[in-house]
Amino acid sequence: RKEVEQDPGPFNVPEGATVAFNCTYSNSASQSFFWYRQDCRKEPKLLMSVYSSGNEDGRFTAQLNRASQYISLLIRDSKLSDSATYLCVVRRPGQNFVFGPGTRLSVLP
Amino acid sequence: SQTIHQWPATLVQPVGSPLSLECTVEGTSNPNLYWYRQAAGRGLQLLFYSVGIGQISSEVPQNLSASRPQDRQFILSSKKLLLSDSGFYLCAWSTPPGNTIYFGEGSWLTVV
């Protein structure tokens, strides 16, 4: 089993839709959690960190469930510019970052 | 503010030729440095990481090597490229305790 797994995608949604991505991690010692966004042929960029209490940044909401070892990202009112691959990232203390395979999102006009 | 640069951005190399990709970080001291590779349509694979000058850890045995001659410089090399070395190479840094990782713009390598 991979250490970080994500919805396989791709997700094709119309503009204005709400879309949710799921991510699970296998190592319960993981302490840090992130969502990155990667545009086609570009480097990954930090979208948001994920905190235990959940956090929101504009149209984006991240949730963490430590008991289920599950992370989610919700995007409301999707824009064409949201089209990208979304990467789930986890890290154990003193260990390297582990990236999920990514979920591709296409927002259609 | 911190910045990271890597070069070249794109290169096409014949099989058996050498490779050198360079990466520098500015605006921070003693960063952790990383080299990742992303094959077409695949996830990120960690190749090397470094916690200090001359300290290199390899995650995947292969014909690539890495060096850190200065605190903020990280170099990825190969003596003889293989077709399977083609991909998108990304340099990255984090500051200990490493709560976030930041990537350079990436280098597209095509081995022909």
Image: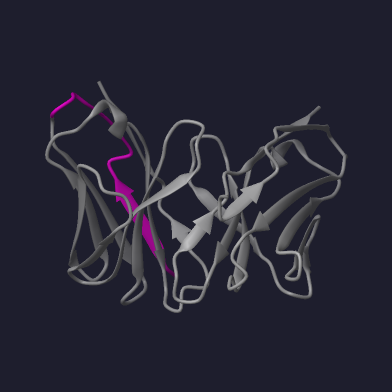
Q: Which is nearer the eye, A66 or A102? A: A66
- At 32% from the left and 77% from the top, the residue drawn is B29
Q: Residue at x 19, y 33 (%)?
A: B81
Residue A62, picture quadrant? bottom right
Residue occupying the point 70% across, 35% down: A9
Is A107 situated above or below A77? above
Number of callouts in the render?
A: 0
Instruction: Report the front residue among A43 and A91.
Output: A91
Q: Is residue B19 above or below residue A63?
A: above
Which quarter of the image is occupied by the N terminus of chain B?
bottom left
Indicate yes or no whether the magenta region holds residue B13. Answer: yes
- Residue situated in front as seen by the camera: A37 or A67: A67
Q: Front-most of A74 and A98?
A: A98
Q: Is residue B10 part of the magenta span, yes or no?
A: yes
Q: Looking at the image, is B103 positioned above or below residue B10?
A: below
Residue segment shown in magenta: B1-16
Question: Percent position (x, y) of residue A80?
Answer: 74, 35
Instruction: Name the residue at the front extreme.
Output: A1
Q: Position of residue A29 (x, y in %)?
A: 58, 73
Q: Position of residue B18 (x, y in %)?
A: 13, 36
Residue B67, located in which quarter of the rendered image?
bottom left
Quadrant for the C terminus of chain B in the image:
top left
Q: Residue at x 78, y 40 (%)?
A: A79
Colour theme: one colour
